């Protein structure tokens, strides 16, 4: 006879993990077996029992501790959220508070066994925030979910994409940096790749060892998903005026491998890549990154021709000291195009950058210039020397111009801008301590990259694809592999029926 409430099942729900923890911790095998049994039990309990609570004992959400009883708490919480009577539609109320509390406190190892349910909760939080027209409310909880599951955030998941899109919609660009600043090194493991540990609860060299298609902590990643993530990330960095990081993300989109076509996302990335280079460096490189496929390079340049023309006029104007009117005319003619591409505000910022790089170009030619001369060469109001002085001061303060403004008196007409002769002099020069700190930062960055490269090498050497290529090479060079070689490979990489079907 089925129980009328969850009470009789409560001891089983509380049985894992053992609390307080035993003196001798569970082995990975025992942990895996017990938690899978608990998950199976939870999946078989009717939703009405999960949300019905304990007779005379209250709601299970008030009895369970999300940091200890992560699995049952998550199942009960989802039962409440998706109940037809209690499904919340606004960012308020007890369920919203409980959901945020769960993401702050869940056990990061236990949740590896409930990937589908974990993603459902993340999407529910997103949907509730969007329904209430407050996307900003979901930004912090989903960021917490990403970083508590994988503190490195270096394995790309479907939640990464949900998060950056929310940040764009909420205009909370700085909040996105905690995740975006972590370089993506890996994608979730698939069933035909060698795992880095026997169980999800095991210790793994990298987070992709437990973020896989088997744990379902990420939805299936498509080619367009990865392109969107890096394009959205670039938009956020551009909003923050972190141009070099934006360019890196855009180049990741442009150099993504393709088969027979160029994605529209790559075309959009190219247009923004041109504008980002103009805004960051005052010129567009003569060619795309070397790893860009010839097909992509050809098609994006054809479709982005108006942007290339804008870049050419910009560079020629700076080199030959044309006034801004020619660039302004080009921008005005293409206003409809820039607006259709959602690039109008960026293009208008190119006008501001033109003046800035015109001043920088003067510094590469002259050691010093009177302020009125700079006004004459770079300003649309050449007689307004005070405005030019303010513009120069802002550039120096923002680190865009390595120079000093010398004021002999209160008359701007007598002021002189003295350009630094090199980066080791002037206001942008670094002290010895700053140089030391920068060297330490670069050394740490290099060490981090080296460790990720070593981890990638280890996984590659264990992959079925690598072993197959070695066997083919040996067969071509020396004939068929020996019996000993075949047995050694079979022991390391057992092949099941599904693998054989995949190879067929």
Image (cartoon, rainbow, N blue to C red):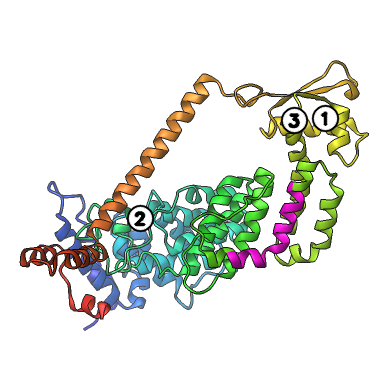
> Considering only order in the chain, which callout, 3 or 2, is on the residue closer to the N terminus?
2
Residue positioned most to the left: 484
Q: Position of residue 419 (x, y in %)?
A: 73, 25
Quarter in which the C terminus is drawn: bottom left
The local secondary structure at tag 1 comes to helix
Q: Earlier in the sequence, mark 1 or mark 3?
A: 3
- Which one is nearer the viewer's eye here, 392 or 134? 392
Horizontal arrangement in the rendering, residue 262 relative to residue 440 (left or right): right
- For disc 1, the marked residue is 389
Cα–Cα span, label 1 and label 3: 19 Å
Q: Residue at x 63, y 47 (%)?
A: 240
> Mark 1 packing: few (<14 Cα in 10 Å), some, or many (20+)?
many
Quadrant of the image occupied by residue 330: bottom right
Q: Which residue is mark 3?
A: 365
Residue occupied by mark 2? 106
Q: Is residue 146 left or right of residue 359?
A: left
From this viewpoint, is residue 412 visible? yes
Residue 228, image x and y in percent? 53, 64
Name the mark nearer the viewer: 1 or 3: 3
Query: Alpha-carbon distance for marks 2 and 3?
Result: 61 Å
User: Main SS of the magenta segment?
Assistant: helix
Distance from the alpha carbon under mark 2 to that under mark 1: 56 Å
């Amino acid at each position: 006879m089925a129980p009328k409430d969850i009470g009789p099942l409560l001891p089983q729900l509380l049985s894992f993990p053992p609390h307080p923890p035993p003196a001798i911790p569970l082995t990975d095998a025992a942990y895996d077996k017990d938690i899978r049994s608990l998950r199976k039990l939870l999946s078989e309990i009717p939703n009405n029992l999960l949300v019905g609570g304990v007779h005379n004992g209250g709601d299970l959400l008030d009895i369970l501790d999300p940091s200890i009883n992560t699995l049952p708490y998550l199942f009960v919480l989802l039962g409440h959220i998706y109940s037809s009577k209690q499904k919340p539609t606004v960012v308020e109320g007890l369920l919203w508070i409980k959901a945020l509390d769960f993401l702050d406190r869940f056990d990061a190892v236990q949740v590896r066994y409930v990937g589908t349910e974990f993603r459902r909760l993340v999407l529910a939080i997103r949907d509730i925030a969007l329904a209430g027209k407050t996307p900003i409310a979901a930004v912090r909880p989903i960021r917490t979910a990403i970083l508590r599951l994988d503190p490195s955030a270096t394995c790309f998941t479907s939640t990464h994409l949900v998060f950056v899109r929310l940040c764009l919609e909420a205009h909370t660009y700085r909040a996105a940096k905690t995740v975006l600043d972590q370089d993506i090194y890996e994608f979730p493991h698939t069933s035909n790749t060698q795992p880095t540990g026997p169980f999800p609860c095991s210790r793994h060299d990298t987070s992709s060892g437990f973020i896989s298609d088997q744990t379902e902590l990420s939805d299936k990643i498509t080619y367009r998903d990865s392109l969107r993530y890096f394009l959205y990330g670039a938009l956020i960095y551009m909003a923050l005026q972190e141009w070099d990081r934006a360019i890196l993300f855009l180049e990741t989109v442009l150099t993504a491998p393709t088969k027979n076509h160029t994605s529209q996302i790559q075309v959009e990335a190219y247009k923004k890549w041109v504008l980002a280079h103009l805004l960051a460096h005052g010129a567009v490189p003569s060619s795309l990154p070397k790893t860009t496929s010839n097909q992509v390079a050809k098609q994006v340049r054809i479709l982005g021709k108006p942007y290339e023309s804008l870049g050419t006029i910009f560079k020629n104007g700076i080199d030959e000291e044309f006034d801004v009117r020619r660039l302004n005319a080009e921008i005005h003619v293409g206003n409809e195009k820039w607006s259709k591409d959602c690039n109008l505000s960026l293009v208008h910022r190119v006008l501001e950058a033109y003046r800035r790089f015109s001043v920088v170009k003067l510094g590469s030619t002259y050691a010093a210039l009177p302020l009125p001369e700079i006004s004459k060469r770079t300003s649309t109001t050449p007689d307004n020397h005070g405005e030019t002085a303010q513009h120069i001061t802002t550039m120096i303060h923002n680190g865009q111009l390595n120079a000093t403004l010398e004021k002999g008196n209160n008359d701007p007409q007598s002021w002189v801008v003295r350009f630094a002769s090199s980066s080791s002099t002037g206001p942008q020069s670094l002290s010895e301590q700053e140089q030391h700190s920068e060297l330490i930062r670069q050394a740490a960055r290099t060490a981090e990259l080296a460790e990720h490269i070593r981890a990638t090498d280890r996984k590659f050497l264990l992959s079925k694809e690598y072993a197959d290529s070695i066997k083919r090479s040996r067969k071509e060079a020396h004939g068929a592999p020996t019996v000993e070689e075949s047995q050694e490979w079979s022991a390391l990489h057992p092949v099941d029926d599904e693998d054989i079907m995949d190879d067929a």
